[in-house]
């Protein structure tokens, strides 16, 4: 059987957090009552005309610089013509052959282009699923319509679903650090479509691609791409051919449904928007964008290596996921110079990141994490107890020290309590005790388990082990 | 009443108001009475009473007729189309607002060809406007309602819009003055768009001085129209220019074949008048001008096919819903709402922009447009103004060209090149041919409105055109 490799390119839409919309003075706010943030321009009323939001251009330039793009000194808006209920003018003002930024590179993936456009309005369908299929009626909320978007298009340089997810996370971090977007997949200020094709390993031409639309979380991006790769793989290996089409991934069922095929593809009849003049990007605009650039993730990673002695891999893991990097830095700062930054880094990268969905508000505050790691480092609690406390703090908040106090989670060690627990364990499983006494180390497990259960994980495993052996050796 | 104030020019009226000889109440009542005499289907709406506003403005409170396609808050703005029948915009066009503020309040809206597509006003969904000189004939278009209303004395002056000749040609056919300003000098915000890169608002008046007066209050950079610019000159009250040494160019390409004998005769007579006033007249080549009409009929339909997409039955205007889904509603609404000519141009434009045809049609037309602009640039190195007949013919009979769109399109043969180049041009009445008015067009470089108004005023003095036969008694 031929071995196939996936080839993935991403198209990412980022809502820019400008005060006003792309072409009018309305202030878009997420979650506002429907159709309260509108005007003749973003409603596409007869006679209304667009005016370019300079701030959005500035944000686009910052993004281009952060992604290493070439900035066009002259850039043009085009009309992309098609009919849909969420598109009030019957065309979207977008960019076509003269985008604001082109070329570029981010962590092994080439950027094809970055351009500016306006967002469509939001359709709300009356069906149970909220999708258009099976809906009796749909209503339109124009609040979102006209919000500035930057569309980032990558080259097909991504080789797996996991890489797509990681790279998207880095992109999110980069955009977030620029302060130009909320980049929330949940609220739709960061949206990702993927172009996916398969080809025999070693081949250089691209296979027929499908486009996977609107996966609204990092997890779904990975799952959706994974599912589409599998679908194509099975199709090709059973002798079928991939048809160029647009697919929707349903995360609940894991199924993929076709939205439209190539035959139905639109002819968008792009032409230069006659209501706008070309954007002339002058040196002072570029300088302003340059001056506003913050520390980018790659620079941050090398700083972590230098300042905190982290391994390159760990430093990148934290720096490329801004939330983790922020938590790490804040926690390390609270703990102070003398503390073990590697412990913080390991915990943030391992325990915290496995518990907190990227971009979610349900997380741990640096103060709490610093306190928790302090307790751990001072040997006041066991690692197992620390994990349990972290769960509680993420779910309910609160102070780890107070939790240890109120729930009696302090480490059991040395004293009578542990000794009694060991005695009880030996007494309750004499068979295992006999084996241990006979030098059979494997038999230690059940006994340690009993002690841990009795102490609710507050005992140190090594200490328990040693205590059992010493007690049985003496018997 | 000692004088019939409707017989004064606006410029004279403004002076009389300033001198206290005419009260604004009297002015408004008199003109409301005039507007109610409309038997030409020129007016689409007449105010119950004229609202004041900008009372001490330089325009003296003289009320204004406004073409249907300007959005006026709470007042029907239909652009001559069934698809916008009864549409009441929630806002007012920048230029209408500015003129109200300057003392020219809205008194009436005027009929037009649907979405400004037409040269005869027969494409108006609410019936054709009749020419006050001969009610069996068209008033020209698309600003035919404005031109007929001014000619017939229903309104003292009016706003029109010009995309390929839509101010100048009806002005010529109705025997009044029409100025198409430099593209960008007047805000387009609130004008229901036909072809964005060509549309421009301008005055239609009985005298050249009135055109200058109205235009002087229309210009300016509008923050809501990105293509608008500040006029580099202030527009001065019009004074007839001394034509001594003024160089007028006559492009053979626009004055030869196709021009009716009566129109040619009037044109030659006006050139003689110009010479007698000291001007020099010489041939002036515009080699690419003959291709202007072809380029125009690709560019304008292409832009309109996109501009009219918002008329989809979703948010405003007509909705016809046969319950066949969204596409069914779009199709039924637009089929019922748009007239033949509009549908024809949407199809032409859609085709011209289609992938695979774009370069051959739209792209090529834009290159022709550039060449035409360069022709004018070259011409204005040697000439102060370029003159042509405004329309190759006088007003034609109703229905005589409706079956033949190409012959209708030729009505704009002399006016379209200036539109493509974005330069200002004015049409003044320069005589009659078989009892019907003829128009004379004067075009100048971008922002030369003061110059072409001055030349027009000098000729106007010499021509002594009498528009009274069109006056509704």
Image (cartoon, rainbow, N blue to C red):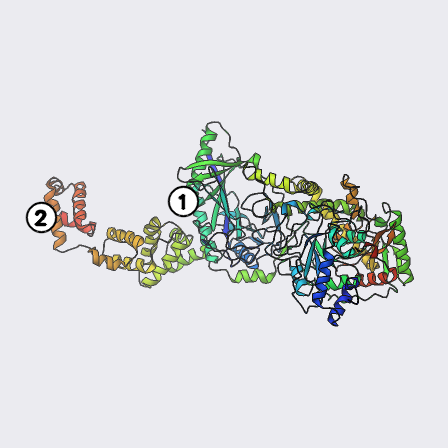
- Counting labels gives 2
Quick check: B157 left or right of B350? right
Residue A447: tell me if it is visible: yes
Q: Residue furthest left?
A: A475
Location of residue A127 in the rendering, given as x and y in whole percent from the top left corner:
44, 40
Q: Which residue is mark 1?
A: A219
The secondary element bearing badge 1 is classed as: helix
Location of residue A227 in the rendering, given as x and y in whole percent from the top left corner:
43, 37
Q: Residue furthest bottom?
A: B19
Q: The N terminus of chain B is located in which quarter?
A: bottom right
Q: Nearest the camera: A394 or B438? A: B438
Which quadrant would residue B107 be assigned to in this image?
A: bottom right
The secondary element bearing badge 2 is classed as: helix
Residue A474 image label: 2
Residue B231: tell me if it is visible: no
Q: Nearest the camera: A36 or A414? A: A36
Crowding near pointer 1: few (<14 within 10 Å), some, many (20+)?
A: some
Location of residue B62 in the rendering, given as x and y in whole percent from the top left corner:
72, 64
Quick check: A316 left or right of B340? left
Residue B124 image label: none
Which quadrant would residue A427 be assigned to in this image?
A: top left
**C-beta proximity under 8 Å, tags 2 and 1:** no
Label 1 is found on which chain of the structure?
A
Location of residue B369 in the rendering, given as x and y in whole percent from the top left corner:
74, 49
Q: Nearest the camera: A159 or B399? A: B399
């Amino acid at each position: 059987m031929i071995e196939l490799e996936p080839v993935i390119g991403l198209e990412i839409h980022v809502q820019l957090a400008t005060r006003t919309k792309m072409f009018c003075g309305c202030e878009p706010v997420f979650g506002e009552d429907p159709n309260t943030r509108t005007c003749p321009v973003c409603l596409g009323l007869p006679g209304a005309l667009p005016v370019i939001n300079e701030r959005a251009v500035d944000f686009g330039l910052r993004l281009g610089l952060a992604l290493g793009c070439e900035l066009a000194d002259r850039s043009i808006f085009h009309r992309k013509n098609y009919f849909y209920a969420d598109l009030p003018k019957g065309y979207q003002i977008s960019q076509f052959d003269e985008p604001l930024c082109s070329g570029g590179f981010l962590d092994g993936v080439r950027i094809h282009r970055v351009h500016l456009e306006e967002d469509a309005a939001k359709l709300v369908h009356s069906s149970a699923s909220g999708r258009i299929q099976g809906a009796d009626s749909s209503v339109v909320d124009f609040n979102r319509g006209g919000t500035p978007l930057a569309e980032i298009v990558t080259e097909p340089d991504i080789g797996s679903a996991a890489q797509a997810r990681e790279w998207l996370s880095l992109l999110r971090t980069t955009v977030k650090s620029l302060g130009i977007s909320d980049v929330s997949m949940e609220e739709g200020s960061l949206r990702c479509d993927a172009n996916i094709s398969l080809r025999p390993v070693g081949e250089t031409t691209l296979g027929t691609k499908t486009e996977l639309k609107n996966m609204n979380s990092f997890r779904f991006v990975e799952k959706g791409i994974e599912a589409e790769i599998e679908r194509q793989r099975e199709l090709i290996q059973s002798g079928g051919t991939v048809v160029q089409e647009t697919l929707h991934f349903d995360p609940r069922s894991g199924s993929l449904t076709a939205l439209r095929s190539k035959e139905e593809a639109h002819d968008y009849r792009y032409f230069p928007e006659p209501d706008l003049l070309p954007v002339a990007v002058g040196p002072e605009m570029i300088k302003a964008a340059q001056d506003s650039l913050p520390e980018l993730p790659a620079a941050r990673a090398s700083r972590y290596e230098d300042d905190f002695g982290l391994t390159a891999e760990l430093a990148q893991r934290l720096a490329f996921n801004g939330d983790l990097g922020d938590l790490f830095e804040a926690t390390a700062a609270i703990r102070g110079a003398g503390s073990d930054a590697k412990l913080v880094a390991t915990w943030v990268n391992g325990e915290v990141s496995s518990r907190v969905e990227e971009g979610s508000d349900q997380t741990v505050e640096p103060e709490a994490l610093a306190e928790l790691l302090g307790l751990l480092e001072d040997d006041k609690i066991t690692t197992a107890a620390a994990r349990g406390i972290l769960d509680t703090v993420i779910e309910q908040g609160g102070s780890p020290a107070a939790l240890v106090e109120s729930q009696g989670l302090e480490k059991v060690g040395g004293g009578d309590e542990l000794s009694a627990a060991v005695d009880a364990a030996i007494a309750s499983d004499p068979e295992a005790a006999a084996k241990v006494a006979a030098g059979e180390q494997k038999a230690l497990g059940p006994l340690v388990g009993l002690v841990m259960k009795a102490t609710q994980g507050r005992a140190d495993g090594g200490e328990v082990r040693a205590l059992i052996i010493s007690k049985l050796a003496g018997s | 009443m000692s004088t019939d104030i409707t017989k004064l020019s606006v410029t004279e009226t403004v002076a009389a108001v300033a001198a206290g000889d005419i009260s604004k109440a009297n002015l408004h009542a008199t003109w409301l009475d005039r507007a109610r005499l409309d038997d030409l289907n020129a007016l689409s709406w007449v105010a119950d009473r004229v609202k004041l506003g900008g009372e001490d403005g330089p325009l003296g409170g003289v009320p204004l007729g406004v073409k249907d396609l300007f959005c006026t808050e709470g007042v029907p703005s239909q652009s001559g189309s069934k698809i916008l029948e009864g549409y009441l915009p929630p806002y007012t066009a920048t230029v209408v607002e500015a003129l109200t503020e300057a003392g020219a309040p809205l008194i009436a809206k005027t009929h037009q060809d649907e979405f400004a597509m037409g040269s005869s006003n027969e494409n108006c969904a609410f019936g054709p406007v009749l020419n006050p000189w001969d009610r069996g004939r068209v008033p020209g278009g698309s600003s035919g309602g404005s031109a007929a209303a001014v000619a017939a004395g229903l309104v003292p002056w009016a706003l029109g819009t010009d995309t390929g000749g839509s101010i100048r040609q009806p002005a010529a056919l109705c025997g009044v003055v029409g100025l198409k300003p430099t593209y960008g000098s007047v805000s387009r915000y609130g004008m229901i768009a036909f072809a964005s890169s060509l549309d421009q608002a301008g005055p239609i008046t009985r005298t050249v001085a009135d055109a200058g007066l109205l235009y002087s209050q229309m210009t300016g950079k509008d923050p809501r129209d990105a293509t608008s610019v500040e006029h580099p000159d202030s527009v001065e009250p019009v004074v007839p220019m001394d034509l001594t040494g003024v160089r007028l160019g006559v492009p053979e390409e626009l004055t030869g074949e196709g021009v009716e004998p009566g129109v040619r005769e009037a044109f030659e007579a006006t050139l003689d008048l110009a010479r007698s006033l000291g001007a020099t007249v010489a041939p002036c080549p515009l080699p690419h001008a003959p291709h202007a009409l072809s380029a125009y009929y690709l560019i304008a339909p292409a832009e309109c096919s996109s501009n009219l997409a918002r008329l989809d039955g979703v948010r405003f205007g007509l909705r016809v819903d046969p319950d066949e889904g969204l596409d069914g509603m779009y199709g039924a609404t637009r089929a019922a709402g748009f007239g033949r000519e509009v549908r024809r141009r949407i199809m032409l434009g859609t085709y011209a922009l289609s992938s695979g045809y774009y370069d051959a049609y739209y792209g090529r037309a834009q290159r022709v447009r550039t060449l035409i602009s360069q022709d004018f640039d070259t011409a204005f190195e040697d000439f102060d103004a370029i003159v042509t007949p405004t329309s190759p013919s006088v007003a034609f009979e109703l229905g005589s060209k409706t079956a033949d769109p190409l012959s209708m399109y030729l009505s704009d043969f002399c006016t379209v090149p200036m539109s493509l180049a974005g330069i200002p041009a004015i049409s003044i009445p320069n005589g009659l041919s078989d009892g019907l008015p003829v128009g004379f067009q004067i075009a100048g470089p971008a922002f030369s409105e003061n110059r072409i108004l001055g030349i027009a005023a000098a000729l106007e003095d010499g021509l002594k055109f009498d528009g009274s036969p069109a006056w509704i008694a």
